[in-house]
Amino acid sequence: MGSFLNAEKWQPIVENFANILRINICIVNADGMPVIIPNENHYGWKFSPYLFAVESNFDNISDGRYELIDRYRFHYYALTCGSTKNKIQSYVIIGPVILNKRLSRDEYQKIILQYKDNIDDFTERLEEIRIVSHNHLETILNTLGSLIEIGRENAISLADTSKLTRSQ
């Protein structure tokens, strides 16, 4: 995992940011193992058990950004978080969110019947999922990307300082 990602320090930051946005956020390593766990009881995360393997489940939409759209048309995004020597070590996963508007009740019912999902559980959880515009989502992703970059820069600075101290 990238040297800047201290799970103990980042867990409350990620939780607070998720609570502000009302969108779940987690961090997983390159193998899909959660490093920072989202709040599983809020913001629709119960829909997301299969998400953790970013490279096999998500589509690369731009450099360092990935998207997954599930059967309910819920959107999930992943940003590269920690990397060394061009090897990705971790991802920040954001979601689920609904872009612009929910499907109709009939459309959801068709999907629920097709996959034999529990309609009561689905209906309860659907209300937790935040509807966002493309512009709002872009702002969220850009802000998280900036925070990740600041973390990387600080980690590099600390590593350089540590090397100088040891060499003296």
Image (spheres, grey):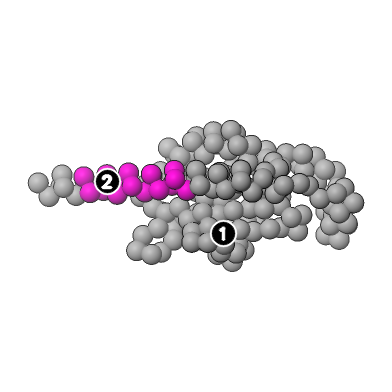
Q: Is residue 133 above or below residue 88?
A: above
Crowding at label 2, few (<14), some or many (≥20) Cα neighbours within 10 Å?
few
Q: Which residue is mark 2?
A: 157
Residue 94 at x, y percent in the picture: 59, 48
Q: Residue at x 64, y 49 (%)?
A: 134
Residues shaded magenta? 145-162
Quickly name the residue at label 1: 66
- Asked whether, in this view, residue 106 is left or right of residue 13, the answer is right
Front residue of 89 and 100: 100
Label 1: which secondary element: strand
- Of helix, strand and loop, which mostly describes the magenta segment? helix
Whether residue 27 appears in this view of the structure is no
Can residue 94 be seen in the rendering of this structure? yes
Residue lying at the far front of the rendered structure: 135
What label does residue 159 carry, if any?
none
Residue 64 spot, x, y in % from top left: 49, 59
* Residue 67 is a magenta residue: no
Residue 158 highlighted magenta (yes or no): yes
Location of residue 53 in the rendering, given as x and y in whole percent from the top left corner: 57, 61
Q: Residue at x 69, y 41 (%)?
A: 130
Could you tell me the amino acid type at mark 2? Ser
| Farthest left residue in view | 168
Q: Secondary structure at mark 2?
A: helix
Q: Which residue type does callout 1 highlight? A: Tyr
Earlier-in-chain disc, 2 versus 1: 1
Q: Residue 168 location in percent, x, y?
A: 9, 46
Please tell me whether residue 154 is drawn above or below residue 73 in the rendered image.
above
Q: Nearer the viewer, residue 144 or 10?
A: 144
Q: Horizontally, is 12 left or right of 115 in the view?
A: left
